[in-house]
């Protein structure tokens, strides 16, 4: 991976297919060493060169050129470093404002739940540790998480957005938090609402039958006790 001539690495990365969930981190934010505290330990030996790639800095010629394998590892480290910086940036005022623009345009998609009526969603990580789980989408209406619809987003590490982002987002923009859904799906059988204990009762009735029963010997459903 490499940026095109005349385009910054950050712009190239965020514009690449599959990276639509990312916003462009301000270079001034990245240049502030305080914002990068602890990341060198996570990235390891390629930290400095990865940072140079992100900031489009000229490589140090005194260290010699890397082979293809080494270059690929540095590029991979650059992606991880940018992702972890991104997770911090979107909790800061400027970053969360950029993400609000994407949220309003439904850049992250909408909730697949029928009764959420196309509610806009936000990216979220299930863990803050890189390499453990891919990004999910959080719906503020039903308060549940979903796998992104497009497979091109299935490779994005969830830690690049973190576990706190959606909750911070609605602290900053409470006006964007929707009301809970007014409708809930109700299971019915022949027009009658199924009682919560109905399935357990059917399992108990089936377990009481002889072991040599056939598939046609299933217990009958009692409408008086199993559905309401």
Image (cartoon, rainbow, N blue to C red):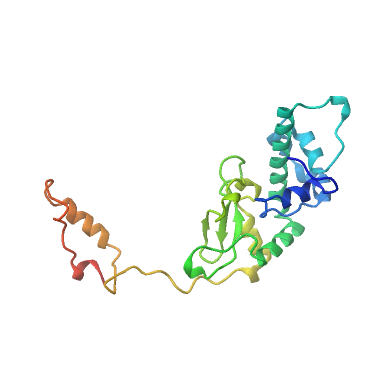
Q: Quadrant of the N terminus?
A: top right
156 w.r.t. 216: above or below:
above
* Viewer-closest of 45 and 102: 102
Q: Position of residue 39 (x, y in %)?
A: 72, 39
Q: Residue at the location (82% across, 27% down)?
A: 65
- What count of labels does the image hold? 0
Q: Residue furthest front?
A: 5
Dividing the image into 4 quarters, which one contains the C terminus? Answer: bottom left
Q: Nearer the viewer, residue 29 or 72?
A: 72
Residue at image x 22%, y 55%? 203
Point out residue 155 in the picture as x, y percentages from the top left corner: 60, 45
Q: Residue at x 64, y 68 (%)?
A: 174
Residue 133 at x, y percent in the picture: 56, 44
Q: Nearer the viewer, residue 181 or 148?
A: 148
**Residue at 71% in and 55% down:** 90
77 sits left or right of 193 in the view: right
Q: Position of residue 144 (x, y in %)?
A: 51, 59
């Amino acid at each position: 991976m490499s940026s095109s001539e005349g385009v910054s690495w950050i712009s190239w990365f965020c514009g690449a297919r599959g990276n639509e969930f990312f916003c462009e981190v301000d270079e001034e934010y990245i240049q502030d060493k305080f914002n990068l505290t602890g990341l060198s330990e996570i990235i390891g030996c390629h930290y400095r060169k990865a940072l140079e790639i992100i900031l489009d800095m000229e490589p140090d010629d005194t260290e010699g050129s890397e082979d293809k394998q080494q270059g690929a590892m540095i590029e991979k480290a650059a992606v991880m470093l940018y992702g972890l910086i991104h997770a911090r940036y979107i909790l800061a005022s400027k970053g969360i404002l950029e993400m609000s623009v994407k949220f309003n345009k439904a850049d992250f998609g909408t909730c697949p739940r029928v009764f959420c009526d196309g509610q806009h969603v936000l990216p979220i990580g299930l863990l803050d540790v890189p390499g453990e789980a891919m990004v999910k989408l959080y719906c503020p209406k039903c308060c549940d998480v979903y796998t992104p619809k497009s497979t091109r987003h299935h490779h994005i590490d969830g830690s690049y957005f973190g576990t706190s982002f959606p909750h911070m987002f609605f602290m900053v923009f409470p006006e964007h938090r929707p009301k809970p859904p007014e409708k809930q799906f109700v299971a019915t059988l022949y027009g009658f609402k199924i009682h919560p204990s109905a399935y357990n009762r059917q399992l108990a009735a089936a377990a009481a039958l002889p072991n040599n029963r056939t598939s046609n010997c299933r217990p009958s459903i009692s409408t008086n006790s199993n559905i309401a």
